[in-house]
Amino acid sequence: MFFPIDPSNGVAIYDQVVRQVKFAVADGVLREGELTPSVRELARQLAINPNTVARAYTQLQSDGVLESIRGTGLAVRKRASQKCQKEREQLIGKRLETVLGEACRSGLSVEAIRQLFEQSLQLVTSTESSS
């Protein structure tokens, strides 16, 4: 399991790990009952401190996404996928509201914002489909 961590984006690294694990569960990359990498293994993969991964895993357990399997490790809980999908939509929705609010306050017309959104969406989807 590998996902990008950006120490310069203003979001705490442990929070980025939490979000990325939730997104992986929402996408079905991590399935119900599947074990997550150990703290040390994920820390090595992401080149971050193991304490950061441990903190993220603790948060994910608290959020009901992961559960401890005695003697084995941490696994994705049943029905975590639906929960993570809902949380992902809420997070992205809030981020879009922030950006769109900023665009409106800057004086851009609704049509100009719509055009920028469509251009950005097209760029992102064409980039994603080519990779």
Image (cartoon, rainbow, N blue to C red):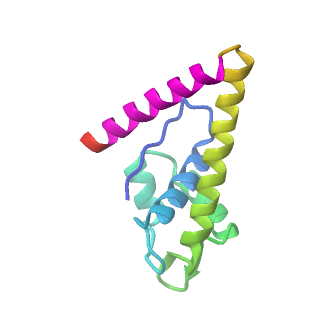
Q: Residue furthest right?
A: 105
Picture coordinates of residue 106 (x, y %)?
A: 70, 15
Q: Residue at x 58, y 55 (%)?
A: 18
- SS assignment for the magenta stretch, majority: helix
Q: From the viewer's side, name the closer residue of 56 and 9.
A: 9
- Tell me if residue 89 is in the magenta stretch: no
Picture coordinates of residue 130 (x, y %)?
A: 25, 40
Please say if 71 is above or below 18. below
Q: Residue furthest front?
A: 111
Picture coordinates of residue 77 (x, y %)?
A: 56, 78
Residue 66 quadrant = bottom right
Picture coordinates of residue 108 (x, y %)?
A: 65, 16
- Tell me if residue 127 is in the magenta stretch: yes
Residue 50 in sight: yes
5 relative to 125 in the view: left or right: right
Q: From the viewer's side, name the closer residue of 10 and 84.
A: 84
Q: Residue furthest top?
A: 107
Q: Residue at x 50, y 85 (%)?
A: 71
102 relative to 70 in the view: left or right: right
Q: From the viewer's side, name the closer residue of 125 and 83.
A: 125
Give the quarter of the figure containing the N terminus. Answer: bottom left
Q: From the viewer's side, name the closer residue of 74 and 77.
A: 77
42 relative to 116 in the view: left or right: left
- Residue range in magenta is 109-128
